[in-house]
Image (cartoon, rainbow, N blue to C red):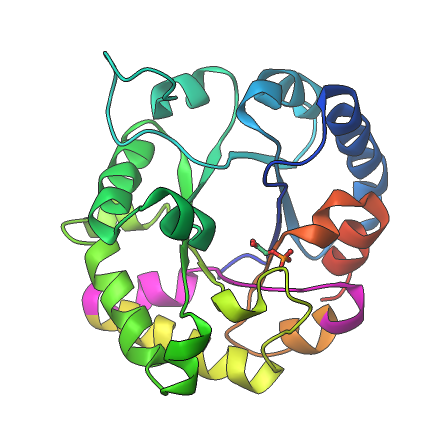
Amino acid sequence: MRKNIVAGNWKMNKNFPEGIELIKDILEQSKNVDKAELIVSPPYIFLSEAASLLSNSTIGLAAQNCSNQESGAYTGEISSSMINSVGANHVILGHSERRAYYGETDELINQKIKLCIANSLKPIVCCGEVLQERENEEHFTVVAKQLKGMFENVSPEEFKNVIIAYEPVWAIGTGKTASPEQAQEIHEFIRETIKNSYGSELANNLSILYGGSCKPSNAKEIFAKPDVDGGLIGGAALNANDFIAIAQSF
Ligand code: PGA
C-alpha cells in the first residue's frame, strides 16, 4: 500500500551552517516519527553534505529542481545524474514558483520527469490551480491538463517512481489552506485520473501530498482524508519542531 510522506520544500532559505543545523535537528527528532517517511530538500549546494549526514537514516533527500538536459553546454544548470551522484534520491518538479517565475511548462517538466527517473531519482511532481481558476471552478480541468502534459509518454514502469503533490497556488505561503474537503475531492480526482491512465494498482500505490500553508495546527485534519497521503511543506519545514509535529499528525 502507499506510503505517508512529509516532504519539506526549503526553497531559497537558509545559509549553509543554518541548513546543516536544521538537518541535524530533524535527524535527531525523526526518532519520534513512525507513521511517515520524511524528505528534506535543501538547496543544491548543500545536498552532498546533507547526504552524508543522512546516510544512516531513512530520511529522503530531494533537490528542488533539475535540468531538462542530460549534460553539456547549459551554463548554471544541474543534471539529474549529478544530483544522483551526490546521494540525493528525490527531486521536486513543476513547483508553481518554477512555473510562474521561470516559465516552466508541462512539456519541460515532462522532460525532467523522464530524466530523473532514468537517473534513479523519484520525482515529487507538483500540480495545482491559481486563485482565478479556483474561483471560475476550473480547478479540475486545470489539474487534469497539467497531469496529462507532465506524464505524456511516461510508462507505467517509470510512473511507479512518481509522487504527486497537489498545491493550490492560492494556498502557498498565504496562510490560506484548502479545507480538508477541498483537498480530498481533488486528491480523489487525481487518483481517479491516474487510475484511468495507469490502472488501479499504480493509482492505489501512489502517494498524493497536499501542499499550501500546511502546519502543525491543520495537518491532522487534512491528513485524515483518505486520499491525502502527506504533505509538501514550505514555511513550516524551516523549523524542525513544526516539521516533525506535522509528520506526527497521522
Ligand atoms: P507553504 O509552501 O507551506 O509555505 O505554503 C508549500 C510549497 O510551496 O511547497
**Is residue 147 on the magenta stretch?**
no
Classify residue 23 as left or right of residue 229: right
Figure label count: 0
Of 5 and 176, nearer the camera is 176
- How far across and down, in percent of the image, does residue 66 sit? 38, 31
Classify residue 29 as left or right of residue 112: right
Is 54 placed above or below 226 here? above
Res 134 → quadrant? bottom left
The residue segment tinted magenta is 197-218
User: Residue at image x 51%, y 16%?
Assistant: 86
User: Does the image show residue 13?
Assistant: yes
Res 248 → quadrant? bottom right
Of 238 and 88, nearer the camera is 238
Is 1 placed above or below 244 here? below
User: Residue at image x 63%, y 41%?
Assistant: 10
Determine the residue located farthest toward the left in the rendered image. Answer: 153
Determine the residue located farthest toward the top in the rendered image. Answer: 73
Quarter of the picture containing the C terminus is bottom right
- How far across and down, in percent of the image, does residue 129 sit? 40, 70
Classify residue 116 as left or right of residue 182: left
- How far across and down, in percent of the image, does residue 35 sit? 70, 57
Is 20 placed above or below 153 here? above
Ligand 1 is located in which of the four quadrants? Answer: bottom right
User: Residue at image x 21%, y 73%?
Assistant: 196
- How far across and down, in percent of the image, does residue 217 sit? 80, 70
User: Does the image show residue 94?
Assistant: no
Classify residue 31 as left or right of residue 186: right
Is 197 placed above or below 94 here? below
